[in-house]
Image: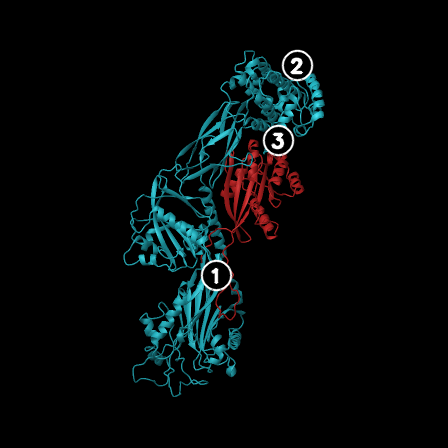
Chain colours: A cyan, B red
Amino acid sequence: MERGSLYPNGADTSAAAAAAPEKTTMSIVQQRFKADETVHLIFEAYQIRGQEHFEGLLTLVSSASGGTYALISFSLLRTPLTASNELKINKVFPINKTFQLTTDTKGSISEQQFDLSTDDDRPSKYYYHPIRTDLSAVDFNEFCAKINSCKKAMWEAELPSETTLNFRWLDDYREIGEVKQELKKRQSQYIVYKDIIVYCATWNVNNRPCWDNNNSLRPWLASGEKAPDIYAIGLQELDTTAKAMLNGNQMQMYAAQWIRKMVESVHDGVEYEELQSVRLSGIMLTVIVRKELRQHIVRCRVNSVARGMFNALGNKGGVAVSFQLNEAKICFVNSHLAAHMTYVAERNDDYKAIEDGMRFEENGLLCRTINDHDHIFWLGDLNYRIQEPNGQQRPGPMNDAQTFELLLQYDQLRTEMSHDRCFKGYREGEIKFAPTYKYDVGTDTYDTSEKQRAPAYCDRVLWKGKRIEQLAYNSVMEIRQSDHKPVYAIFRVKIKTRDEAKYKLVLSEVLKAVDKRENDNQPQIITERTIIEFGLVRFNEPAMRDFNVYNNCPQQVDFMFKVKDSPNDICEKWLHVDPQSDSLMIDSARSIRVRMLVDPTSITGLLHKICNTPGKCDFDILILHVRSGRDIFITVTGEYQPSCFGLSMETMCRTNRPVGEYKQDEIKQLMVDVTPEYRVTMPREFFLLIDYLHKQGDQLKGIFQSYDRRQPLSSQFNAVRDWLDTWSEDEFPGTPQTAAEALLLLLDLPEQALLEPFVEDLLHSRSKSEAMELIALLSAPKRNVFMHLCMFLREGIERHDYEANNVAAIFGRILLRTSKSNVTLDYQNLCSQFMRRFIHVDSPDTNAGGNGHAGGANGASGASGTSGASLQA
Amino acid sequence: MTAAPYNYNYIFKYIIIGDMGVGKSCLLHQFTEKKFMANCPHTIGVEFGTRIIEVDDKKIKLQIWDTAGQERFRAVTRSYYRGAAGALMVYDITRRSTYNHLSSWLTDTRNLTNPSTVIFLIGNKSDLESTREVTYEEAKEFADENGLMFLEASAMTGQNVEEAFLETARKIYQNIQEGRLDLNASESGVQHRPSQPSRPSLSSEATHAKDQCSC
């Protein structure tokens, strides 16, 4: 990592080298991991929970088999660390595509802080000291740089195949599911022990085919009264001739015939089936089970370890079958170890190699070994001999227990086992049968050949594990086709079994407890109130309210205001909320400020909402979301004091008293009214403004220069607002500029542009007369306002108070406002052109030529007619 | 031997809807805690409860959103319908108005959820027989006409509460089995947590290489 490739599969020994004699923190951490996992760096980081801080370590670890990196966060049970069991894993962050390290000092108590997150989990906050205390740790910059380079190396570099990368190795370090953990704890409440009979058999068949002599195998396989539940039958030297070993098919056929013969020869009266067979050259193990047991067997795996010549030929070695029956993990091993009297050490080595090398694949990459089983049965031609003191080569007849006992004193296996040189932890039953090797084929006579091999107990059955009782252990003399006699052993095993009824009960209790814990541990906050009352809210007058949220639950809580569908924001335009999100430590509170301002940019939306909400309209409902918890609705409410700004011309024409005397729901009634019945022909508010402006004479010079809704309003605006909303008879409280501002807003703020619904058609009308036909169709208030406005503007232009093109541009954009988002220059030109037709004194409609001229004449007469009518109002 | 990282195979999202005061929160509480919550305060927002159940030997985590019933929250609660696999629509058998509003609740549910969302109608407060204003028969007819599952239940006595929640889950599970519910659709309201696949045996010398693994 330090110098070598960043690639976890690459050779990288620097960390291992660091773990040399002295016990550094690094080396202690390394002990927590498996051999193919490397700790690349450690970084001192602490966490804060409540008022306390907890020392911890972040370690960057890679797995060679997974090809991936992860950060593993430990809390320290002691500092400085003295042993690896003082490290407690509290979180695992796989460095995958979602992994993030963010430094964020917002609202922090320390500048030395950062967040880690992965897989959509909520980020975990870590803090660090500016100066490290442990010399094997890195500093923050190095930490970040290393992680970034890991990310790069893994995800951006060219990879052999991305599918080979995985994070399964991390499963060992993650907390196992709460339910599983709890069930494991309460195992005793639903585990019962059930007796099964296990029949182990072994025979070195000396390369003889199974049909040789047409011998029955029943004396060997169907001994004992009770029908066994499981058979494990091991054969050696199935056919070890070179010819057979080179011909795989023939070997296969041989094996199949043997298996068939064995299945035929087991106990009567019970249905059996072959569970699994495994073969390594001439060493074969077949497991046969009662049919009805099969459905309770899971995770069946086989494997083999080759020994013999070059440790690879497989003429010696071992094969094994591993499976789980109910809750019991059972393993059978059949081995053929090194031969010859003097090769004791080689036999021990073979045993060791098989024990170490035998691996059964689990989910993903985890493997189980032979010793990971509850019940292990090891059988086979172990080849240990009887090593009698010199001169005592062949005692006399060997058929009585006394002699067996005498011989067994010199049994190499027993000697080696007693010195713990092999089969540690294994047991063997009492041997009350004659040595099983070596006989003249077809007889019960010991080797009469020139070699005159000493008799020996080559063929054995050993066991390891709890609750195993041997019922029988014997050889079968009458099977004579091999130079070995077959051996069998019968066991009663009490296996762990789940009592389904009890298990169901425990499971339901566990689930209930887990549910309860989850529901009870939901993060909670308390809000001081859920209704924010603003009272009377007036146009263009800001107001604000504060409220508190508290965290009264035993964990840190994150809260945020949720973005809603409508509006696509956390709140309406007339509101502002601060803060929009935050974290609350245990027992802490935070004040949240809600500000309200109904201004030209938001009045249209508010009035729209008031009109379209059945019943009383709240200003807004905010969703206060607690991360991983509930949502709280905060209702923002109050009474909007209507003003003429934002009301349509029609609504204003329906009022029978000043707008300021209306309540919110009263004005709503007028706004949703669609009947063409009006109290006045033109809004009084509009008329008053025009009238005031009209009387200002040359003071109007230079007004209507520009207009933008978003511009701040003048300081006198609210006085003008009140003057209009009360139909005041006082003098106008502002300047011509304020009046112009108010006039423009009055025309611009209604939801619908003044010339709707004909804007589109009017824009494309070719002459004033064509436009007039449409304008005649507008509602009376709109029509009258338009004509009156044009007349007023024309007068001003005549007096050269303001410039025609400028006024046409400003008013055109307002009166022909479009809801289309992109207002093009072309569109603006069309608006201006339209307005110019109506406000130009001499209507120089140059583009339209003759048409324009005629239109201008017609328009003028139409306009004077209409405005005449409105003046009478 | 390795633990799967999750406690469950599926997550189903439910919403509980209906007028204010019909007992939505009490039904949820009765289901998750097996207790009646007297003097239950009005829900101002959306509460949230979980329970792991078993259907067909599969562990299913129900994630239940209990919404505010007040009319003023109607617009806001609409955003919670999205992605619900099950909707429990509740009325109060002792208040006719809560029954009369069902069609409006049903319209919202149909508009805001996907077609495979299971809608279960619950007539709550079945223990208050003496003040009943809605008969079982008329509600049953309404349910049948609209293709809803239906039960009368009591959050107070617990009667039929378990059944309503579990029947809904069974129906959703059945929809999955029969392919009527697309698990990949983001709004199905169901999340699947597959357990890790186990790889077949690698031994080349196994003479009878059947896949013996059934874990």
Q: Name the residue under label 1.
A: A326
Residue type (three-letter) at the residue carrying disc 3: Tyr
Marked residue chain, label 2: A
A389 left or right, relative to A181: left
What's the CA distance linking mark 3 and mark 2? 33 Å
* Badge 1 vs badge 3, beta-carbon distance below 8 Å: no
Binning the other alpha carbons within 10 Å of mark 3 as few (below 14), some (14 to 19) or many (20 upward) gives: some
Please tell me which of labels 1 and 3 falls first in the chain: 1
Task: Find the residue positioned furthest to the left.
Answer: A22
User: Residue B4, position in %: x, y?
Assistant: 47, 54
Front: mark 3 or 2:
3
- Residue B194 visible, this angle: yes
- The label shown at residue A871 is 2
Q: Disc 3 on helix, strand or loop?
A: helix
Location of residue A825 by image quarter: top right
Residue type (three-letter) at the residue carrying disc 2: Leu
Q: Mark 3 points at which residue?
A: A827
Query: Compared with residue B12, is residue A587 higher up or lower down, i.e. above or below?
Result: above
What's the CA distance linking mark 1 and mark 2? 100 Å
Please tell me which of labels 1 and 2 falls first in the chain: 1
- The label shown at residue A363 is none
Q: Residue, x 54% and y 11% (percent of image)?
A: A731
- Residue A285 visible, this angle: no
